[in-house]
Image (cartoon, rainbow, N blue to C red):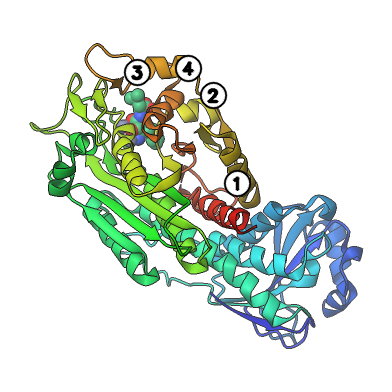
């Protein structure tokens, strides 16, 4: 998606589609009468009659009149422009992106003035347009062989504005980086487990490292055995696929200090193991690497935007399979940290692989930890499919995190983790910890277990089991992988870089 900037005039627009925002009060838009004149004054009437809708996230398409070079106008309803915030604007553009896809548009022009009736600067609009259109036009390139539908892509966006190109282009560029990274994460989540194996995920990460000059390490079964990563090895034990611990290091300051660790669950397929999932519960478990995708997506943004903060990303990847060699309930395993774990449920595998990954992140110098995982069905029971669940041991760190989440519009809700919860995680007749303390409070026990390995390091746990995949189209994209937390993790690192730069 390339961008160009053109003077704020409605003349000489050659794009397939002109995108116009329609606020409740069109009189707030400078130059609206010029637009109306393009339609010989009919536009006001269309809005009054509702043929051109002004309600938020309502879209209307109108063919352009003879004499204009653009082919259509897409009217994007903004509703009450006084209450329109940055997240609403992102959604308005994502909705417009979906419409553009339907219209098979390859180019679009955004009439910036029609979106400025709120408090937005032209740069904010450029950012929202790039991010929203990028997210909204996303589609997964599936594996259908029979389709003869031509794949169209939005290649060119022209911003109609009087602001300087030197202000508009960078803002658009950042929005595009964010959208591209989310879409890459969506692709990873949508890719089936027979194709996206742990080895394939490591290859993807190696490419990313190469592209952005990240430090890169990858550990296989032999290296894990050598180091004593008994937890991830136990989960991998029933598989014919090699496990991978993937490490990316981004050096944003002179010294390797004040390091943020991003840790992702990368289960490429979760059968549940001997605590086998049901035949309906198992479908969709290719998406059990959403945490890994979020971390990889965030690293792409970090690689592009290069904040002054050190980041180590650690991804624990394997599938969770059944075979004669698979791990079993009652097994006792020894994690990299030295802590022993009684396995009560092989379907609680995410917390096991994360245990070793968190320890490895700490050993790699992480001073802050965020783990991201499709960890429990419990988070869905508690919060539904549209909220990410969180736990933390650090009020201050979490405050910064919430600021990032509010910038990106990704909803996060914190649950408690009490001493009593920890007691139950530590209760076992034969080991230091157990991986499934009971049928209640799954999300807290899952995350709390990971917290045992974070120890005193400021830590945030994000359970994205509900938010990582969508069963139907949503505000920012189609059904399937959402790429949730990609933008928030990157924004968090950015905010932390700003904080330490002060
Ligand atoms: N991968 C699942 C969690 C999940 C559920 C992700 C639904 C996406 C959608 C995880 O490994 C799991 O099976 N968790 C169990 C834990 C329990 C057995 C302690 C769960 O939440 O039921
Ligand atoms: Zn599981
Ligand atoms: Zn799982």
Residue at the spot x=43%, y=72% of the render? 150
Of the two numbered discs 1 and 4 on the same chain, state the one appearing first in sequence. Answer: 1
Residue 220, position as x, y percentages in the image: 18, 50
Neighbor class of circle 4 (other Cα within 10 Å; few <14, some 14-19, many 20+) is few
Give the mark toward the camera: 2 or 3: 3
Residue pointed to by mark 2: 416
* Alpha carbon distance from label 4 to label 2: 10 Å
- Sequence order check, earlier mark of 2 and 1: 1
Determine if residue 68 is in view.
yes
Residue 480 lies, in percent from the top left, at: 44, 49
Density class for disc 3 (Cα within 10 Å; few <14, some 14-19, many ≥20) is some
Residue placed farthest to the top in the image? 429
Residue shown at 20% from the left, 29% from the top: 334
Residue 191 x, y percent position in the rendering = 33, 54
**As displayed, is residue 473 above or below residue 445?**
below
Q: Secondary structure at mark 4?
A: helix
Q: Residue furthest left?
A: 324
Label 1 secondary element:
helix
Residue 419 - label: 4
Q: Given contact means CB atoms under 8 Å apart, are the residues at marks 2 and 1 in contact?
A: no
Q: Which residue is mark 1?
A: 405
């Amino acid at each position: 998606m390339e961008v160009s900037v053109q003077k704020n005039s409605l003349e000489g627009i050659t794009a397939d589609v002109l995108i116009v925002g329609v606020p409740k009060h069109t009189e707030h838009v400078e130059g609206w009468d010029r637009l109306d004149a393009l339609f010989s004054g009919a536009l006001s009437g269309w809005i009054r009659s509702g043929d051109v809708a002004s309600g938020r996230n309502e879209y209307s398409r109108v063919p352009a009149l003879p004499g204009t070079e653009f082919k259509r106008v897409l009217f994007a309803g903004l509703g009450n422009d006084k209450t329109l915030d940055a997240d609403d604007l992102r959604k308005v553009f994502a909705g417009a992106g979906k419409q553009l896809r339907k219209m098979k548009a390859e180019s679009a022009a955004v009439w910036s003035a029609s979106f400025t009736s709120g408090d937005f600067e032209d740069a904010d609009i450029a950012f929202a347009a790039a991010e929203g259109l990028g997210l909204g036009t996303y589609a997964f390139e599936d594996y259908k062989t029979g389709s003869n539908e031509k794949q169209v892509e939005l290649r060119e966006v022209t911003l109609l504005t009087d602001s300087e190109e030197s202000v508009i282009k960078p803002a658009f560029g950042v929005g595009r980086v964010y959208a591209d990274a989310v879409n890459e994460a969506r692709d990873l989540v949508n890719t089936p487990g027979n194709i996206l194996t742990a080895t394939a995920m490591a290859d993807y990460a190696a490419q990313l490292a190469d592209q952005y000059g990240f430090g890169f390490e990858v550990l296989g079964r032999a290296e894990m055995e050598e180091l004593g990563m008994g937890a991830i090895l136990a989960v991998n034990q029933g598989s014919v696929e090699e496990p991978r611990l993937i490490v990316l290091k981004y050096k944003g300051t002179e010294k390797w200090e004040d390091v943020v660790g991003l840790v992702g669950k990368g289960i490429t397929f979760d059968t549940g193991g001997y605590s086998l999932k049901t035949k309906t519960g198992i479908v969709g478990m290719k998406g059990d690497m959403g945490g890994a995708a979020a971390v990889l997506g965030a690293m792409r943004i970090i690689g592009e935007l290069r904040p002054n903060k050190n980041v180590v990303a650690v991804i624990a990847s394997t599938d969770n399979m059944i075979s004669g060699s698979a791990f079993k309930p009652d097994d006792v395993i020894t994690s990299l940290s030295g802590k022993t774990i009684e396995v009560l449920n092989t379907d609680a595998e995410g917390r096991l692989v994360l245990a070793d990954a968190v320890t490895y992140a700490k050993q790699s110098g992480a001073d802050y930890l965020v783990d991201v995982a499709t960890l429990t069905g419990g988070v869905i029971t508690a919060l539904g499919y549209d909220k990410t669940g969180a736990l933390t041991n650090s009020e201050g760190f979490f405050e910064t995190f919430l600021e990032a989440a509010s910038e990106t519009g990704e909803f996060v809700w914190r649950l408690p983790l009490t001493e009593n919860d920890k007691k139950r995680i530590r209760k076992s007749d034969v080991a230091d910890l157990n991986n499934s303390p009971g049928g209640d409070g799954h999300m807290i026990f899952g995350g709390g277990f990971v917290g045992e390995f974070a120890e005193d390091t400021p830590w945030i746990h994000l359970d994205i089991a509900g938010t990582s995949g969508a069963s139907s189209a949503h505000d920012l994209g189609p059904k399937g992988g959402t790429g949730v937390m990609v933008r928030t993790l990157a924004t968090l690192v950015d905010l932390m870089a700003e904080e330490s730069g002060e």
